Amino acid sequence: MPSRRLERAVYGLIDQGSASTLIFVITVLVARSGGSREVGLFAVFYGAFLVALGLHRATVSQPLLATPITSDRLAAQAGRTTTVAASILLAVPTAITAAVLGMSELLAIAIVGPGLLLLDLHRHIRHQGHDVRGAALISASWLVGLLVGSPWIQDAQSALWIWGGVGTLIALICELMSGSAPIAWLAAKRWQLTQAKLSTSLAADSVIATLGTNIAGLIVGARGGLTELGTLRTAIVLFGPVLLLQQAVSMQALPRLAVATPEHRLALGNRITVLTVLIASVGGVAILLLAPLFEAVLFAGAVGIPVIVLVGLAIQVLAIGLYTTPTLMRKVEGRYEEVVLVRGLSFGAGLAAVGFSPLGESAQGAAAAFALQGLLLAGGLRLYAWRRNRRPGPPMR
């Protein structure tokens, strides 16, 4: 059993690592050729896709992991049905907007976006079916394809087309290998989650998190310019490995928490907290120390990242480590609405700081706002649990 768990952990790390390295490679290539401004331009359109991806994961992918499914075929059929609907909602208005505004970057999102949603579905179906090796193969193939096309990445537009085109091609290959046909998507029965309340809360939380983060970035781009947004995005990419490890822990822990007994779930949650906080602490210190080397070697001096930006993001990833366990617990227990409430308040405060104060005029201010969001969310969840534990009834974990 230990070797089996180690194998799953390794493949899970490969899966998350490949997906994270994709954006890291793109950011480095775009920054070296076009500087912070081109990185900021890529961040705007990549952020638009992340909004759709967040909604898709909230309604399809994450419930696949949080809810036990007896039939992989049923999950796959239902996932494809919802993915088609999400793809239409993404592609049609985006294509119309691109045509009206004459923005080829937005047109790229409209064309490749549906394929990327389908690719994300295939990864999560394999995680739900405990085929972590299959998910890792998908992500690694995407990374290899991007590296093959990297000589043609010169700016934000070429990056979007190559990144999305390779992902769409892999999604189509996955469909052919699974023996499904597009017509079966529309004929499949709609998947009814066993916990409708959980589904609604997951969707609301993902909407708040995704929209909040991307709207904050857009505000920085509007108030401070694309260069400031590009600087912020480059700094976020440096923290990619830290976030990757935290996400790998979460993705491996969520299915185990879903089937664990209450006593084992509590012990597992404590281990998750220690591990995610340790990852954030060690990773944050390492990035602060090695940042000058990254700027000189990776970005060829084309991008300079202020120390205060790195400090703000280091505080944010530490806060993520603190609130990872409470959010996972409430996903599997169906008591996720309190996370939605606290996240909404914390992101509202962060957006207000970025939108109506000088913080929104620079990458330094935005990083401070992100740190504020994370600390408010972590502190709010802990306070909520403390207050509820003082009331009669079962204690919160």
Image (cartoon, rainbow, N blue to C red):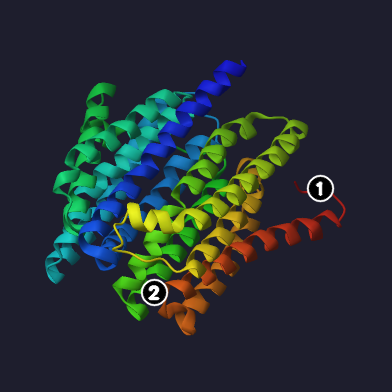
Circle 1 SS class: loop
Q: Callout 1: 10 Å neighbours few (<14), some, many (20+)?
A: few
Per the image, the residue denoted by label 2 is 220
Name the spot of residue 144 as percent of width and height, x first: 26, 34
Foreground residue, 249 or 239? 239
Kindly identify the residue that appears in the image at 22 percent across and 54 percent down. Answer: 109
Left or right, 219 with reference to 321: left
239 over 6 or under it: above or below: below
Question: Which amino acid is tagged 1?
Answer: Pro
Circle 2 SS class: helix
Left or right, 6 with reference to 186: right
Foreground residue, 361 or 337? 361
**Dot label at residue 172:** none
- Residue that sits furthest to the bottom in the current view: 357
Quarter residue 270 falls in? top right
Q: Callout 2: 10 Å neighbours few (<14), some, many (20+)?
A: many
Question: How many angstroms separate mark 1 from mark 2 (CA)?
Answer: 41 Å
Q: Can you tell which of label 1 and label 2 is closer to the viewer?
A: 2
Foreground residue, 165 or 2? 2
Question: Which amino acid is tagged 2?
Answer: Val
